[in-house]
Image: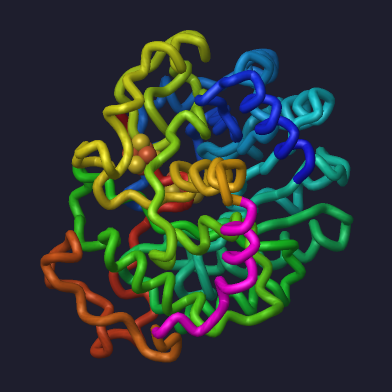
Amino acid sequence: MLKVASYVIGKKLRGQTRYPLVLMLEPLFRCNLNCEGCGKIQYPDHLLKKRVTAAQALAAAEECGAPMVSIAGGEPLLHPEIGDIVNGLIAQGRYIYLCTNALLLAKKIDTFKPDKHLSFSVHLDGLEAEHDHAVARTGAHKIVADAIRKAVAAGFRVTTNTTLFNSADPRRVRAFFDEAMALGVGDMMVSPGYAYPKAPSQEIFLSRERTITLFKKIFSRGKKHWKLNLSPNFVAFLQGKRDYDCTPWGTPTYNVFGWQKPCYLLSDGYVRTFKELMEETDWEKYGQRSGEPRCRNCMVHCGYEPSSVRDIFSFGGIFRHFAAERHNFDDNGEDPDTPMPPITSADGGADANNNDAANADDATANTPHTCCCQKPKP
Ligand code: SF4
Ligand code: SF4
């Protein structure tokens, strides 16, 4: 994207080493789903009723200056000012990913107008069985699929966002990619889930090694018609072909509490201004190389996609970018048609509840009830 490229080049020319790429805007935590294990809908009622106003959201976007904004939640379509927020961000010239579970998308589609700056980023966690189980609602997948078709037919750009955990079966993920493309989405975003250390079920999370094996299987001998909303370097990183550290300042988070330190997933305190966030956060304490235990297994999109983008603008980066683009779907030695190996204690989880060959046919075995915006409360 030309605008992002010129933004990054401008920052580099000014000698700025830390700059935001995507503002993660959470205008509310309330949701119309009730996924078991979701840390947002567990907030007390008075916090679920709180909202970032349209004026606050637009001021935060100006203050931060990131060229892209991801509007997450909760469910942003429940926000009474969501139309004003989106229109205001478009007027600021920002590219918006409006993340939604899509239950209300068909009903609220007329709130928006197709615009090259706006994409609906629809939460879809897999084929029907996986998605309905993940969001704990039978029939949710059908509603989402119908909403995607309607939005695409109305001229909107639609992308999917999918989070994978230990239960992921690479064969079914590949089938899901085929299905999503057939629905007419422009492209697909996929990320490993964040292994939150305090979560009661550690066995649902992917270790770093297991994440790499999973994504190698998913992308090995990948299909040409799959369009990914991921930078080629990030796809290479997920397959273990690149070794990046995290760039937490690349995706700063603003919500009803203020600016969240240090990233979308961890909440080590809040500050009032973006300047305070950038200047007062001890960034060296975070990332997989820092020794911070909460970052050890993290390979999530919001932390490592900015690292992948930064790489493009470093020495030789453009060649790595094009090489990754060319070879990401090559045969990488992992057989995509076989299930994941059994989970061991080294995978960061219990030996129980694994998704080895014995239960690979149970599509919903051990699927966590969290979505891409999964984040336990602080
Ligand atoms: S490694 Fe993950 S958890 Fe740690 S700062 Fe980066 S995004 Fe946050
Ligand atoms: S996990 Fe996501 S979709 Fe589910 S209740 Fe929480 S915010 Fe809503």
Q: Is residue 32 visible?
A: no
Q: Where does residue 267 sit, x and y in percent of width and height?
A: 34, 28
Residue 281 quadrant: top left
Most frequent secondary structure within the magenta stretch: helix
The total number of labels drawn is: 0
Tell me the residue at 38%/23% (across/down). Answer: 261
Asked if 98 appears above or below 254 in the picture, the reply is below
Of all residues shown, which one is farthest toward the front?
315
Colouring mode (rainbow / by chain / secondary structure / one colour): rainbow
Q: Is residue 258 left or right of residue 205?
A: right
Q: Is residue 179 left or right of residue 310?
A: right
Q: Nearer the viewer, residue 323 or 69?
A: 323
Q: Which residues are magenta?
A: 318-333
Q: Where does residue 169 sit, x and y in percent of width and height?
A: 39, 78
Q: Is residue 184 left or right of residue 24?
A: right
Q: Where does residue 335 sit, x and y in percent of width and height?
A: 41, 88
Q: Is residue 114 visible?
A: yes
Asked if 207 appears above or below 244 in the picture, the reply is below
Residue 223 quadrant: bottom right
Tell me the residue at 66%/24% (across/down). Answer: 13
Q: Where does residue 138 sit, x and y in percent of width and height?
A: 50, 68
Q: Is residue 302 magenta?
A: no
Q: Nearer the viewer, residue 153 or 197?
A: 197
Q: Which quadrant: the C terminus?
A: top left
Tell me the residue at 44%/42% (across/down). Answer: 303
Asked if 137 appears above or below 170 in the picture, the reply is above
Q: Nearer the viewer, residue 141 or 345?
A: 345
